[in-house]
Image (tube, rainbow, N blue to C red):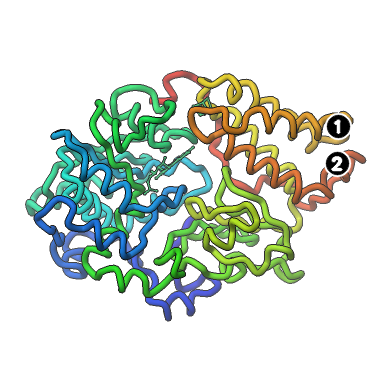
């Protein structure tokens, strides 16, 4: 169950004092409500005009890689081709993430404003919205309302992303919009240089676009009023708490993680955090308890905020079993095009499942380390690298559990699955379209 919780989540008072939420209204906002709150789309009337403000704001992408937005805008704005494409990425292909769906449902017009403003900024001739099905009705309604008012400079083509882990990766997205399967391809060239149909293509996460819509209205100083100097602004996070409540929270970048997740004292019963989702990093408690939600801090622990999936694993669950479940899912989600990924990830998944069983071969841990080394850096996309990051951190944080399982024991008192995974794994070729 996903809720917006700037009131009820821990740290809610601090967020309110910081002027948050900025992106999420309490209830779905139709066009009339959106216009009453924000006014018309603040077009600048010129290609490139918004780039300086975005650069001063220091906005980075919220789809996972935190790449500086002004740099991608500048590449596409500066391209000589007459045909240019912009895509709003709402695929939200990480199964544990809920923030893009909620944003699209509650504030579709903020995302669509950002899409139009970014399209104007780069001189896009074609605009697309690529999304996971759940938010489609709200988006289609918003687009119809906007068309009736003549608000949009460009019409927007909506395409549904298949529910696959890789579907939101930008080269997979470009393949899908071009009529092919949502599978990644090797880069370079980057899609910003040669993307959909060979045109320079700007792909931005839908949350990134909503931030652009606000920066265009309120300016970079306003944006920088929250966050850290190096990583300004706020970000949406999907937070899994031990009480099984899943919450989407808009948090200031640099917020103490314990304010969002709890810090593992006995009353809260948390054994570890998972930061950054299924390509993310397990962190041990209490060692990580002082960390904050920003990449500069997280990097010291080999972690990154990614697309904002934050998990507090309750003490009664087996982290090793949870990790093994996720890695079998990730192995099944390999697009099967690159040998090391196709062959290596299932072996890694089988090795981890063996550790999570009762007793394992002597060489299993060493095999896992060897296979991890063999797949790293060997894919067209970073699926193998992300999976290996998750696996290595699990092996470290859950080392005591590995020893217990080797003796045929397990510390879990609750064996229900904790981390969300799609029911039934798609396996056929058509599932990529
Ligand atoms: C395996 C994988 C899955 C991804 N899935 C998504 C996704 O569902 N949504 C998204 O916005 N970005 C996703 N990305 C990141 C995109 O490739 C791309 O960097 C992003 O959409 C750019 O937008 P941003 O700069 O605004 O973050 C994924 C990347 C990888 C490697
Ligand atoms: S690395 Fe794996 S997931 Fe990525 S394109 Fe190659 S086979 Fe597909």
Q: Residue 44 sits in which quadrant?
A: bottom left
Which image quadrant: the C terminus?
Answer: top left
Residue 352, image x and y in percent?
A: 74, 35
Q: CA distance from mark 1 to mark 2?
A: 8 Å
Q: Residue 262 sits in which quadrant?
A: bottom right
Residue 333, image x and y in percent?
A: 54, 29
Q: Is residue 47 above or below residue 14?
A: above
Q: Is residue 2 above or below residue 364?
A: below
Q: Earlier in the sequence, mark 1 or mark 2?
A: 1
Task: Assess whether mark 2 and mark 1 are in contact (beta carbons under 8 angstroms).
Answer: yes
Q: Is mark 2 within 8 Å of ligand 2?
A: no
Q: Is residue 190 left or right of residue 281?
A: left
Residue lying at 28% horizontally and 58% vertically, measured from the top left:
212
Q: Nearer the viewer, residue 403 or 233?
A: 233
Q: Is residue 88 left or right of residue 310?
A: left
Residue lying at 7% horizontally and 51% vertically, measured from the top left:
150
Q: How many marks?
A: 2
Q: Is residue 300 left or right of residue 233?
A: right
Q: Is residue 256 above or below residue 143?
A: below
Residue 62, image x and y in percent?
A: 41, 53
Residue lying at 33% horizontally and 65% vertically, measured from the top left:
57
Q: Nearer the viewer, residue 134 or 398?
A: 398
Q: Which residue is mark 2?
A: 405
Residue 43, image x and y in percent?
A: 13, 58
Q: Point out which mark residue 100 bears.
A: none
Q: Which residue is mark 1?
A: 360
């Amino acid at each position: 169950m996903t809720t917006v919780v700037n009131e009820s989540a821990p740290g809610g008072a601090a967020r309110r004092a910081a002027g948050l939420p900025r992106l999420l209204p309490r209830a779905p906002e139709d066009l009339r409500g959106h216009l009453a709150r924000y006014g018309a789309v603040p077009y600048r009337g010129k290609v490139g005009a918004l780039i300086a403000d975005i650069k001063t704001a220091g906005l980075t992408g919220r789809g996972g890689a935190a790449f500086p937005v002004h740099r991608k805008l500048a590449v596409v704005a500066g391209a000589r081709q007459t045909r240019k494409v912009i895509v709003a990425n709402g695929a939200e292909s990480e199964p544990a993430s809920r923030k893009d769906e909620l944003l699209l449902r509650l504030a579709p017009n903020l995302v669509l404003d950002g899409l139009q403003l970014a399209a104007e900024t780069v001189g896009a001739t074609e605009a697309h919205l690529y999304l996971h099905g759940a938010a489609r009705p709200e988006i289609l309604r918003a687009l119809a309302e906007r068309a009736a008012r003549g608000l949009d400079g460009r019409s927007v083509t909506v395409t549904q992303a298949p529910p696959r882990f890789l579907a939101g990766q930008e080269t997979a997205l470009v393949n899908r919009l071009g009529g092919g399967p949502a599978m990644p391809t090797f880069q370079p060239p980057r899609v910003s240089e040669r993307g959909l149909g060979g045109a320079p293509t700007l792909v931005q996460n839908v949350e990134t676009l909503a931030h652009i819509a606000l920066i265009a209205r309120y300016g970079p100083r306003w944006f920088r009023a929250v966050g850290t100097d190096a990583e300004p602004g706020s970000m949406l996070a999907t937070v899994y708490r031990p009480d099984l409540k899943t919450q989407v929270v808009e948090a200031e970048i640099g917020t103490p993680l314990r304010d969002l997740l709890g810090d593992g004292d006995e009353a809260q019963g948390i054994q570890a955090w998972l930061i950054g989702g299924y390509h993310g990093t397990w962190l041990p408690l209490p060692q990580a308890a002082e960390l904050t939600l920003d990449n500069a801090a997280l990097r010291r622990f080999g972690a990154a905020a990614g697309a904002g999936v934050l998990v507090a694993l309750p003490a009664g669950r087996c982290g090793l079993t949870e990790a093994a479940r996720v890695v079998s899912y990730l192995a099944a989600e390999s697009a099967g095009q690159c040998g090391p990924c196709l062959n290596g990830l299932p072996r890694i998944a089988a090795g981890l499942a063996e550790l999570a069983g009762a007793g394992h071969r002597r060489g299993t841990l060493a095999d896992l380390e060897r296979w991890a080394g063999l797949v790293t850096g060997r894919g067209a996309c970073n699926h193998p690298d992300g999976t290996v990051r998750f696996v290595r951190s699990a092996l470290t944080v859950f080392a005591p559990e590995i020893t217990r399982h080797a003796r045929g024991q397990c510390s879990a008192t609750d064996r229900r699955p904790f981390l969300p995974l799609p029911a039934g794994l798609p396996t056929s070729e058509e599932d990529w379209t």
